[in-house]
Image (cartoon, rainbow, N blue to C red):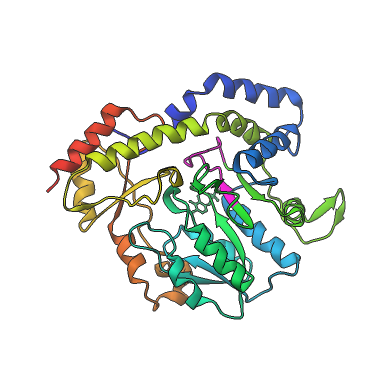
């Protein structure tokens, strides 16, 4: 079987170092909010080019806490609108509605699958307070256009960078392309913990401090509570695991790029639509997504060759039961994408032999 993603093999590359880091945490006797987290936050902020990074429990909380902090800072209030792509993973939308804010869905570009920057301005109202571009599949959005719209209308730009650790737009990396950014360290992400984890990056000191307090019961100072906060922290064990893996992230990305380039150059089948890459270093290939008008048939064909594929994602947010209030709305580009996409195996440990097998199987598909 060619697995979609072999997490065991990925983490096994660093086994000795991970075990050593694990032992260091056990022996430290300090498991929450200690030096491991502090050090990782500082290294990750450096990696992204942001001034601050605040570890949190997961990627969803990272996005929730950014919006919540803007509310506490008086920048947003209940009922305000946040522009977000209509084809994103549900977590981007949940972060908005959990804060009693209103998601305004904007269709993606059919070629890049990223929010169509040319369609944003039409959706801006006096209630709009932020744009949340999602660097979906690992490719950064058109941040020059998005930031200039945000500037014109005085909006915050909150990146959902959960799939784009290390991706560039021009000279800056995801995490340093807007006012604030939320990352996930879910095990399957390009930088994955051995459990849940997330982080907020920003260069806004007040925002960083507010997020930190909100994730720690709303407390800036022990036993003094400024806000009605939550408990959402990056624990020492996960921070230590991530500290090991961050050193190898660029190498992981390099391997993913090689596989992606091989797919792009060698998949030759007129019934398959390959992904469009704006610029090579804009994409870190969290997933390699192709489109086919009969995805189920293609998926079955690949399974016959022992090739595992996944779908990111089968149902668009506006068709989810949880958001039944949108069930009559139409987002035809998103619907087409959700109907046709299929993600091929890709990872830093996938062999060229397996990559070639995937290409051959797709080229044989009729
Ligand atoms: C994974 C993901 C999230 C949520 O991250 P978790 O750590 O799983 O909570 C948010 N947005 C996008 C685009 C994601 O892919």
Q: Position of residue 196 (x, y in %)?
A: 57, 42
Q: In this view, does 64 lie above or below 80?
A: above
Per the rendered image, the range of residues in magenta is 182-195
Give the residue displayed 65% in from the left and 49% down from the top: 201
Is residue 162 visible from the viewing direction of this image?
yes
Give the residue displayed 44% in from the left and 72% down from the top: 119
Q: Where is residue 92 in the image (x, y as percent from the top left)?
A: 53, 60
Q: Quadrant of the N terminus?
A: top left
Q: Is residue 280 left or right of residue 165?
A: left
Q: Position of residue 364 (x, y in %)?
A: 13, 41
Q: Is the magenta stretch mostly helix, strand or loop?
A: loop
Is residue 306 visible from the viewing direction of this image?
no
Residue sticking out furthest to the bottom: 126
Depth check: give the residue in front, 327 or 258.
Answer: 258
Give the residue displayed 36% in from the left and 34% down from the top: 258
Give the residue displayed 20% in from the left and 49% down from the top: 298
Q: In this view, does 118 lie above or below 267?
A: below
Q: Position of residue 181 (x, y in %)?
A: 60, 53
Depth check: give the residue in front, 265 or 358.
Answer: 265
Q: How many labels does the image show?
A: 0
Depth check: give the residue in front, 59 or 41.
Answer: 41
């Amino acid at each position: 079987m060619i697995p979609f993603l072999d997490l065991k093999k990925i983490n096994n590359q660093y086994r000795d170092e991970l075990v050593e880091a694990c032992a260091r945490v056990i022996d430290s006797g300090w498991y929450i909010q200690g030096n491991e987290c502090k050090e990782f936050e500082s290294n990750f902020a450096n990696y992204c080019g942001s001034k601050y990074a605040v570890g949190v429990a997961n990627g969803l909380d990272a996005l929730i806490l950014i919006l919540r902090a803007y509310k506490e800072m008086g920048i947003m209030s209940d009922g305000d609108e946040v522009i977000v792509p209509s084809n994103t993973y549900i977590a981007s939308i949940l972060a908005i509605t959990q804060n009693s804010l209103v998601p305004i869905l904007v269709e993606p570009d059919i070629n890049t699958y990223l929010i169509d920057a040319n369609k944003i301005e039409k959706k801006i109202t006096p209630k709009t307070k932020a744009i949340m571009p999602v660097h979906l599949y690992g490719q950064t959005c058109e941040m020059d256009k998005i930031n200039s719209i945000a500037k014109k209308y005085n909006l915050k730009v909150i990146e959902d960078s959960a799939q784009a650790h290390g991706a560039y737009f021009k000279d800056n990396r995801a995490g340093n392309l807007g006012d604030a950014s939320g990352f996930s360290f879910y095990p399957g992400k390009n930088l994955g913990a051995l459990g849940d984890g997330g982080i907020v990056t920003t260069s806004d000191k007040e925002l960083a401090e507010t997020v930190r307090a909100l994730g720690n019961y709303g407390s800036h100072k022990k036993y003094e509570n400024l806000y009605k906060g939550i408990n959402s922290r990056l624990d020492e064990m996960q921070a230590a695991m991530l500290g090991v893996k961050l050193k190898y992230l660029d190498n992981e990305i390099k391997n993913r790029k090689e596989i992606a380039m091989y797919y792009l150059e060698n998949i030759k089948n007129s019934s398959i639509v390959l992904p469009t890459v704006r610029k090579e270093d804009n994409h870190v290939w969290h997933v390699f997504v192709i489109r086919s008008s009969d995805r189920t048939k293609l998926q079955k064909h690949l399974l016959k060759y022992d090739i595992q594929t996944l779908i990111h994602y089968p149902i668009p947010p506006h068709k989810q039961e949880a958001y039944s209030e949108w069930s009559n709305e139409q987002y035809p580009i998103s619907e087409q994408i959700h109907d046709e996409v299929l993600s091929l195996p890709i990872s830093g440990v996938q062999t060229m032999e397996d990559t070639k097998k995937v290409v051959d199987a797709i080229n044989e598909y009729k």
